[in-house]
Amino acid sequence: MFDIVAVGETLIDFTPSGVNEQGMQLFSCNPGGAPANVLAMNARLGGETAFIGMVGDDAFGRFLRKTMQDENINVSGLQITKEVNTTLAIVQLDEQGDRIFSFYRHPGADICLTEKDVPQELIRNCRIFHFGAVSLTDEPSRTATIYAARMAKETGAVISYDPNYRPALWKSKQEAVDIMTSVLRFADIVKVSEEEMVLLTGKNELLEGAAALVQAGASLVMVTRGSQGAFYYTGSCHGNLPAYQVSVVDTTGSGDAFLGALLFQLAGMHKQDIRLLSQEKLENIVRYCNAAGSLTATAKGAIPAMPDHRQILQCMKECPPEEASMP
C-alpha cells in the first residue's frame, strides 16, 4: 500500500545559475514538476510513494526517471514515449526570488498521458491520491487525470488537489477557472496560493475563500502565503501561522515541499479524521509544513533543495518566525 500516488507532470526546470565569462546568463538543469516534487518531499520524510506520468525517450526523460528512483519514488507508472520530447520549463527569478515561467510544451510528453497509461493497481493501492491542474491544461492528459481522480474517489482514497495555476498553459483565464473548479468535487485536501483562491472562488478574504472551497467538498484547505506562511481552514477551526525567517534564494518547489510534508503527516487518516483535527494538532502540522517550505527556498531548484526531517525540526527550533499579518 502506497502512502501517496500522484498523477501529472514531471519536467525539466531550467533555473538561473549565474553568468559565463561573456556575461551571458547560465541555466542549470533541475528535475521538476509539482506532483513529482510533492512525492520527492514526502519520500524524503519516509513516505512510500509512486508516480504516474509520461516523459520523452530522451536524455531529460532518463534523468527525471533516475532522479525519482534516487528519491525512492516508485516509477512503475512512468511511461516513456518516442513520439514527443520531455517537457521543459524555463524559470526566471525576480528580485524577491519569485518565479516567472516559460514552457516548451507544444506538445510535451507530460500532456500525452492517456487513460490506458494509468495503472489501476497503483490507484487502488494508495492511501492518498494527489493531482494538480497542469495535467488538466490539455488532452489527453486532462481525461487521464480526471479518470484517475474518479477511480481514487471510488476506491475511498483521500484526494489531494493543487490547482497550481500557470497562465501560459491555458487558452484563457476563463477556461482555467472552469476546468480547475470542475474537479474540486473530487478533492478532500486543497492547497492553493492566495491568488489561486481568489481566482477559483472570487473571494478576496481568506476566511470566505477557504470556506467556499470547503463548501465545494474539501475537508481541509491550506492557503499558502509566501513569507506570511499558511492559512488553514477545516470548517471547525482556522488560523494563520507564519513562515520561518530564512535567506531566500529560489522559491521554486516551496509550495510543493509544504504539501509533501502535509501529506506525510496526514497519511493513514480518513477524510473524517482530517476534518475533525483539533486546532492544536493542525497548528503543529502547519508549523512543520512551513519549515519544509521555508527551507526549500534557501537553495536553487526544487527537489535538490528539499530538507529532511532533522533539518525541518532544527528550523522549527532555531529559526524565528516571520511576522504574519491577516490581509
Image (cartoon, rainbow, N blue to C red):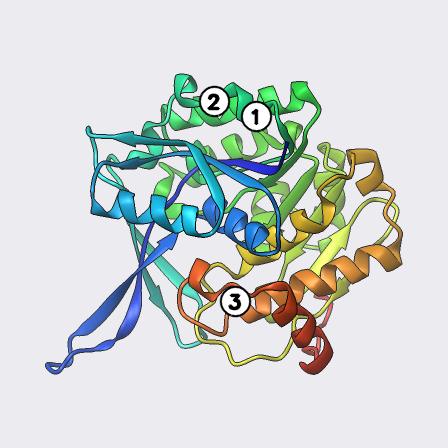
Q: Which residue is mark 3?
A: 296
Is 125 or 169 nearer to us in this picture? 125
Three-letter residue code for mark 3: Thr
Report x, y in % for residue 155.
67, 20
> Can residue 239 be seen from the camera position used here?
no
Q: Are marks 1 and 2 in contact (CB under 8 Å)?
A: yes
Q: Earlier in the sequence, mark 1 or mark 3?
A: 1
Q: Amino acid at mark 2?
A: Pro
Q: Nearer the viewer, residue 288 or 97?
A: 288
Nearer the camera: disc 3 or disc 2: 2
Residue at label 1? 123
Residue 121 is situated, as x and y percent measured from the top left of the image, at: 54, 21
The x, y position of residue 175, in whole percent, is 45, 33
Q: Which residue is mark 2?
A: 119
Above or below, 128 relative to 125: below
Q: CA distance from mark 3 to mark 2?
A: 31 Å
Residue neighbourhood size for the residue with mark 1, other residues' Cα within 10 Å, grouped as few (<14), some (14–19), many (≥20): many
